[in-house]
Amino acid sequence: MIKRNFTGIFLSSFLFLFTGCGEDKKPEASDGAMTGSEGTPGAVSVNPNREVYWGDTHNHTGNSFDVFLFGTPNSTPEIAYRFAKGEEVESPTTGRPMKLSKPLDFLVVADHAELLGAIPLMYANTPGITDTKTGETFLKIAPDKSEEGLQKIYDILQYAAFDQPNEANLGSKDLIGDLGGDKRKEAWLRYVETAEKHHDPGTFTTLIGWEWSSNNRGANLHRVVFMPQGGEVAKQFLPYSALSSDNPEDLWAWLEQTSTRLDAEFVAIPHNPNISLGLMFPETRLNGEPIDREYAEMRMKWERSVEVTQIKGDSETHPALSPNDEFADFETYDFAITPDGSRPAPTEADYVRSGLRRGLALESKIGVNPYKVGMVGSSDSHTGMSSIEETNFAGKGQHDALPEKRPHPTGIGSSKGWDMGAAGWVGVWAESNTRQSLVDAFQRKEVYATTGPRMTLRFFGGFDFSEDDMSGDMVASGYERGVPMGGDLDPNGGPAPTFMIRALKDPDAANLDRIQVVKGWLEPDGETMERVYDVALSDGRTHGSVAVGNTVDLATGQYTNTIGDPELRVVWTDPDFDPSKSAFYYVRVLEIPTPRYSLLDAIELGIPVEETGHPATIQERVYSSPIWYNPD
């Protein structure tokens, strides 16, 4: 069933649209002109029932200092866009041809705001950068851009960020003055122009953005930020940097000020809660004061989704936090970004499910839920390529780009190549593939995360759905009498909520194992609880404890779709509903077992898969954004 093509070239057998019963068929292109934030007028297809568009909101190129210094100086936004659009490119890490199995619909090139473009400009002999104290020092260390020299520069930057002594005697003030601040303008303007060049409303959307990369005391508090506006607005500011402040509250304040000044809109998405050292979903602010209503309202204005899965691991939950969830231990990654490479124990503030639960508890105290977030997946690729399929994985960066490099350290914490996970992308339910329509979907949280396969998932909540709605026009019924993923149930809707869920396999990937509903709720004493329900099982199984099986041949890396189902659907009513208790519900859909890329590497290298330190097979999955219930 699965074939690895080491040139990265795959052919898609057919275009997969979520159709049926007249619900989601793509209409003919509209004659209306799309203007404003979309730039030049043109005909764009619009579907009021919405279609799923696939993208990556988190891709890094050589404008990020770490990408360049890890030995990938030829990674550019130009290559990133071309690759995402489905073109074959020469890999910036290996020089080999690479191509997606099928194009993405949109992309955010989100390079680090800190020192944006400074390293390539330094090597381009740019006045005001090359001739600074920092520039001159770095060029002496690595005049020929050797791997050893570039690594030394990276180490100096890391030590400076933590205010620790380094051999160049450079501190954070040197970096801000010499390579940061307004000196990023040239690189930012070049990036914006490239984004505008590749923006093609209705076909391929470029969302202009960046990453604010706070490493507060070693905690990953990074946020990806993007906007629906185009280059005309983006050229009027420089991205806010963690060198100005590593406190998220200061980022939100900047977004507020800039939004007001330029009549702009921003989306901020936290990433990698799993290595946040207990700070991503906290009960206290960084200044030590308790989370209050003002904090919660400001956070929810700007951060309505969270990145639940990516190359540096899965952040849905952890087996230590969800001991009764047999599927909790998935791509677990706990390598903190600290100089000592420590591996801290997980806390409730590090994972999304426990963060959602904590949000219910905080809402009961302060009146606002600060963690009412949707689910997003994206790559965090540091190669410029959004290549996260198990059979076509480009790695995190230069240090793990090839199978023979993956037994060795990546330079990120104490991790090695095989510790990285091949994930993820985000599915967005939008009326059209345009900047504003996509951002509107992020704002209402009608988005979901995939670890790789492009499964199509619909999820509606209401109080009177029936099998007739599911077999009829499910989408029309869902929008008319309920809410989609990301929505809020009417507290006066009825005796117990009912959910319509429909999942279809990626046509180029594996069959489905099961649909699960994950519920969290708040008890009267303030304790939060969780439960995972198996609501639809493949192959006629009646109990979730019965495994779907595993067809993967460990000698060849092949599997078959002789188990599982191509489609699962269900109308499910919560059997344990208590109208007095706040709750959330989200959907998790699992594929049948398929080969992890580490098995394919082991086969190529001729080694036992056990030497990779990771399982031979995994069950890929998608996570919907939650639907919430709050009593009056």
Image (cartoon, rainbow, N blue to C red):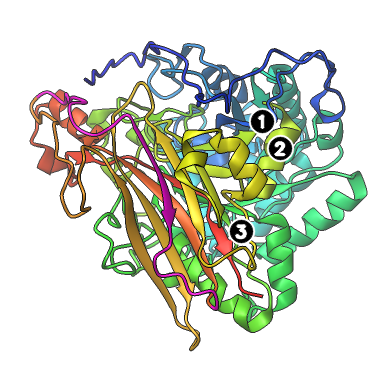
Question: Viewed as shown, does residue 282 lie left or right of 183?
Answer: left
Q: Which stretch is magenta?
A: 556-580
Marks counted in the figure total: 3
Q: Amino acid at mark 3?
A: Gly
* Residue at image mark 3: 171
Question: Which is more foreground, mark 1 or mark 3?
Answer: 1
- Residue 571 covered by magenta stretch: yes
Q: Is residue 238 left or right of residue 213?
A: right
Q: Which residue is disc 1 drawn over? A: 121
Question: Which numbered circle lies on residue 129?
Answer: 2
Query: Marks 1 and 2: in contact by CB < 8 Å?
Result: yes
Distance between mark 2 and mark 1 Cα atoms: 7 Å
- Mark 1 or 3 closer to N-term? 1
Tell me whether the residue at label 1 lies in contact with that at label 3, contact meaning CB atoms closer than 8 angstroms: no
Tell me the SS state at disc 1: helix
Above/below status of 293 relative to 402: below
Residue 370: image quadrant is bottom right
- Is residue 440 found inside the magenta-colored segment of the image? no
